[in-house]
Image (tube, helix red, strand yellow):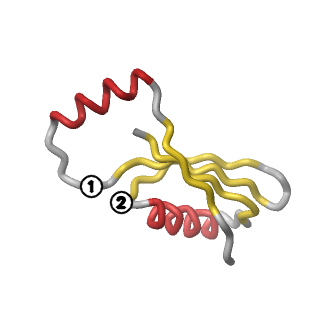
Amino acid sequence: MEHSYMTSVLQSHTEVNNNQKRANRSCESNNQFYLICVVDFDGEYLDFTVEASSYSQANAIADSYCESVEVYIYEMQIYLLN
């Protein structure tokens, strides 16, 4: 099933400080966390977080998860959590 998705970056002042601390630590992977907000055809909402290296990969993971729990996606929004 094809659908479009919106992307955005959510960041607060506290998160900016946390990002600076994270930048000082070494990371083993380039993955980031994405908040996935899904609306199904019945108008019900499902929110969850995935770890991925890009919006496209986050979308693929979300598609796979929704398919496994039999949620039919009407709208999906993907937010990068910094």
Q: Please determine whether, in this image, residue 31 is positioned above or below residue 65.
A: above
Relative image position of residue 71 (x, y in whole percent): 71, 63
**Residue carrying label 1:** 30
Q: Residue furthest bottom?
A: 1
Q: Residue at x 23, y 55 (%)?
A: 29
Identify which residue is drawn at 73% across, 66% down.
72
Q: Are marks 1 and 2 in contact (CB under 8 Å)?
A: yes
Along the viewing direction, whichever of 62 and 76 lies nearer the viewer: 76
**Residue shown at 79%/50% (left/top)?**
44
Secondary structure beneath label 1 = loop
Q: Which residue is mark 2?
A: 53
Could you say where residue 18 lies in the image, as x and y percent from the top left? 31, 27
- Disc 2 residue type (three-letter): Ser
Between the residue at mark 1 and the residue at mark 2, the CA separation in whole angstroms equals 6 Å
Vertical relation: 32 (above or below) 54 = above
63 relative position to 54: left or right: right
- Residue 25 location (% of width, % of height): 16, 36
In the picture provided, is 65 more to the left or to the right than 4?
left
Among the 4 quarters of the image, the one containing residue 54: bottom left
Taking the view exactly as shown, the residue that stands out farthest to the right is 42
Q: Amino acid at mark 1?
A: Asn
Task: Categorize mark 2 by other alpha carbons within 10 Å: few (<14), some (14-19), many (20+).
Answer: some
Q: Nearer the viewer, residue 81 or 71?
A: 81
In percent of width and height, residue 79 lies at 53, 47
Tell me the SS state at disc 2.
Answer: loop
Asked if residue 9 is positioned above or below residue 2 in the image, the reply reads above
Q: How many marks?
A: 2
Pick whichever of labels 1 and 2 is earlier in the sequence: 1
Image quadrant containing the N terminus: bottom right
Quarter holding the C terminus? top left
Q: Nearer the viewer, residue 18 or 45?
A: 18
Residue at position x 54%, y 47% in the image: 8
